[in-house]
Image (cartoon, coloured by chain):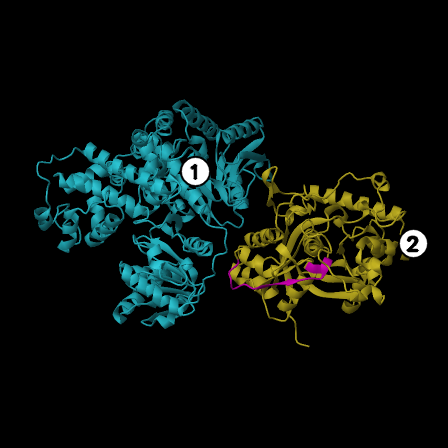
Amino acid sequence: MSDPVTTFKVSYPVSPSAGRLALLTMDNGHDHTKPTTLGVDALASLERALDEVAAQSDVKGLLLTGKPFVFAAGADLNQFADVSPEDARYGVSAGHDAFRRLASLEVPTLAAINGATLGGGLELALHCDYRTLSETAGPIAFPEVFLSILPGWGGTQLAPRLLGSRAALQLIIHNALSNNRMIQAREAFDLGLADRLLAPVDFLEQSLALLERLITGEETITRPAPDERHLDEALTEARKVADDRTHGATPAPYRAIDLVEHAARGGDLEEGRQGEIDAMAELVPARQAQASIYAFNLVQSRVRKQPWKPDAEPKRLQRIGVVGAGLMGSQLGALWLQRYQVPLVMKDLDQEVLARSQSTIEGELDKRVQRGRLDAAKAEWLKSVVTYTVDDADLAGCDLVIEAVVERMDVKKRVFADLERVLAPDAVLATNTSSLSVAEMAADLQHPERVLGLHFFNPVSAMPLLEVVRPPHVSDGTMATGFAAAKTLRKSGVQVADAPGFVVNRILMRFMGACGDAANRGNAFADIDDAIKGLGLPMGPFELLGLVGLEVGAHVLRVMHEGYPDRFPLDANFQMLAETGLPGVYDWDRGRVPYDEIRERWQVLEGAEPLTPDQIRTQALEAVADEARHMLDEGVVADARDIDTCMILGAGWPFFNGGICKHLDQIGLSEKLFGEPLVGPHDRAAG
Amino acid sequence: MTQLRDAVYVDGARVPIGRARPDGYYANTRADDLAVRVIRALLDRNPQLAPHQVDDNVWAATTQIGDQGLTIGRTTAILSGLPKSVPGYAVDRMCAGALTTITNAANAIRVGAQDVVIAGGVEHMGRHPMGEQADPNPRFLAEGLVDGEALVMGNTAENLHDHLPEITKERADAYAVQSQERVAKAASDGVFDSHVVRMSAWSDAHGWRVVTEDEHPRPGTTIEDLQGLRTPFRPGGRVTAGNAAGLNDGAGAALLASAETADELGLPSTMRLVDYAFVGVEPETMGWGPVPATEALLDKTGLSIDDIDVVEMTEAFAVQCVAFLDHFDLPLDSERVNPYGGAIALGHPLAMSGARLTAQLAHYLQTHPDARYGITTLCIGLGMGCAVLWERR
């Protein structure tokens, strides 16, 4: 499925001072909700527009801009899906040809950047002689490396020439690898992307006036040559960031850095362009980019449409309760309060815990005020509508209560039973359990249909995933309320069945088990972590364990073991870790070195041989593939895409692996193990 | 009576007038955006004036719904980037909308309540056809308060012909041709360049376009062209699309200030508002309005028509203008009335027109050093007329 075709529409305003001008508008015939993208037809349209302009000798200058609120959102990604190297080369070359023509027009050209400007759109602007930027234009970014390709329409060559290598690498590498960070107009202007920053209200008129003054010579723009005295440091830093973030698992950032280096060292522009074409011909068809396009469609399109949401009216939430005001409960309280802006009741058994919770929640609000995200007076009002209480009766009138008490079934069942006594029969009960059975929690209630799981990830404010757990007896209205809450809380809600560990923890624990096995065979923790990071994962299993906490890890493993004793054996070493009371495996004060106690108490299997890094990876991937297969057969998720969405958004697993199932398919492991891919054939396009 | 201060005209601007058609300039442009463009231009052209020094932003529109609703003086103040401390309000007196904002603003200045005010009018007749969502009280007709024809402006023009049989269709057409000729000449002389600002306008076919000239004029129109036109309001009638103003989109405004503030800030001040008159007439012949309004104004100020160097009058219908000329014994081709032509050629975006007349009057005074007094005058729906007297400063 391709995007709507963008055309370059031309009009010819006549300026009293500068003469006849060409005004090019990029438009795809839709409003800003369908941003303008540049596919092969758009490039042909640009060529035609430039033919028309060049044929008119009285045209004195050219202004290029976008439809309202959008400049251009880059290449049409869908056209990159499943392309051959030849087609990739053709498409990238076509862009260079058209953009080069724009750059070689004899008259002055000005890009009036009026809105969203991504990737190819930014490269197009860089091919103009001058740029103006509307103060509210954005987002602006080179997202290519995030997608395991690179800015291949001149971006790696022109950005360093204009901005210097440091700023170019900031955009092309650092921002792209920081979860695709995008910038707004002010920052873009400060980086040097535009010559003038103008008010949006009469942006086009003022941009045109600038072009006129540039044509008549009334005004000139000169830019200082970029300072490249610290080029080597900038390159080293960028390569280090690429290593830290991708561990060499995708070639794109390294190719991009090489090309930026070529430009920054004064390399020939045409050679640089050719380098981009060669790189893209390799990168676009490669598995990393193909997986990225797949992943992009999952998180940008599919999950936003909430395909799981039942056709029922969600409950309107006007009073919300949280039971269990510990760290997790307080984070939940702060989030629901900020997003719903309705009265909130925080309930706990312990006054001291409540006092800490109050300072956490109020601190969160204050932070938002400091960042200018929340009006100070509104923040004070929000503080005033929170009740901190030890009394269940104060929860009366809540439309939804979420529990975040200790992960024990008996405690959670008692909490729900108590809640049912004070709440209306249709109030929604949610549990934030990470692994326990939601159905069992609801089993003794009068209204089990009102219970669902809303599994948030830590830290709550930063992690985008919400596992929306569907127990067997839940009502459609309750599930609709869950998905509506996901939207209001700005989380990506994915429906999962009520099975131990749901998706993310289940995959992670199985993965962890395979890695633990390597440790049991005598591999060092750090060697295992390094082997796993070679897959491009953000951290290794033992590094992750420190973040999760050894006790929590052991607890989740116990729950998984109860559900699936064969595949989740109770590893004595893991139970030992929990007993140590240590914060993690590594004593970071000494570097990535295990605590002595752990090293001494870890039991290595007698007669076992350590594995090679390749064997570790294969063993881990096979375990994950097996578990994914079980999850699909069991119906934990309807579709392997949901596993991938969860792993990307809940565990930070990389785009270039497409989560994990896509990767298992790409490397042929699914075929080898199951005789077919995990991801179905319907998953080619946005879906 | 306390001494009033002088309210002076500092500057005026308008966007090119478009045709209210699906293929017109502004078919895809909002009315409030037209007004905002004018405000921005006034601020841009008068950099001595800091935006926070604007005390009020007064805008008129006849149909105050949708993009012309929500108190368009306030919406456009915010949209144009005026500081939030600058208030605004909305006015409606149909075709005299902008002229009423100007007299209101001038009064606030004259009594010393405010120092600097933007006063304008906007009408996007493409988005808001005349009478959109109007709901006339049935008593109007049931009790014979007004004739049914009073609500259809073309009928009131036919009625005016009935009352003034000496104004034949031939004289009306001759006047209309003269309006086209005068507008064409004024355009080539650059008269409109003094206050018409260009406007970027979206078009689905062309993307962004930059509009620089009025869309409505038909230069080269001849008597013969007009003779063949239909008389849509009455079979065998006299009023045609050729001797009436069109249906148009546009926005225009004046920047007014107290004389003291203008001098202090170094703002130009072409003319001062001397006095004005609004009168009511029979709604069935609303085009008569400028005559009694001008008579009332002359009477109040002790001047005679001979003292008036130039009159800028809206041309809703040629018959209305010829009636005015006849009443004051002026020839049809008097150089003192609409020397740059008028709405028959340029178009008449209802509430906007008063701003255009005022800007053209200012241009006349600027370019005719011997001229001292000028009048801007309009006829108004439901039977009213207005006239404003300006004096060179």
Specify whether disc 1 shares its chain with disc 2. no
Mark 2 chain: B
Position of residue A331 measured from the top left corner of the image (x, y, whole percent): 32, 59
| Circle on res. A399 | none
Identify the colour of chain A in the image.
Answer: cyan
Q: Between tags 1 and 2, which lies in front?
A: 1
Q: Nearer the viewer, residue A16 or A657?
A: A657
Residue A176 located within the stretch drawn in magenta: no
Residue A33 can be seen in this image: yes
Name the residue located 70 percent from the left edge and 45 percent from the top edge: B19
Name the residue located 49 percent from the left edge and 43 percent from the top edge: A70
Question: For the residue labelled by badge 1, is the local secondary structure a helix, a strand or a loop?
Answer: helix
Amino acid type, mark 2: Pro
Residue A141 can be seen in this image: no
Q: Can you name the residue that lies furthest to the right here?
A: B165
Q: Are marks 1 and 2 in contact (CB under 8 Å)?
A: no
Q: Nearer the viewer, residue A17 or A477?
A: A477
Residue A192 lies, with reference to residue B321, above or below; the image says above
Amino acid type, mark 1: Leu
Residue at mark 1: A122
Position of residue A447 measured from the top left corner of the image (x, y, whole percent): 41, 61
Residue B83 lies, with reference to residue A122, above or below; the image says below
Q: Dot 1: few (<14), some (14–19), or many (≥20) neighbours within 10 Å?
A: many
Q: Dot 2: few (<14), some (14–19), or many (≥20) neighbours within 10 Å?
A: few
Question: For the residue labelled by badge 2, is the local secondary structure a helix, a strand or a loop?
Answer: loop
| In-image side of A11 versus A652 (left or right) | right
Tell how many labels.
Answer: 2
| In-image side of A480 versus A520 (left or right) | right
Q: Which residues are magenta?
A: B82-97
Residue at mark 2: B165
Identify the colour of chain B in the image.
Answer: yellow
Q: CA distance from mark 1 to mark 2?
A: 68 Å
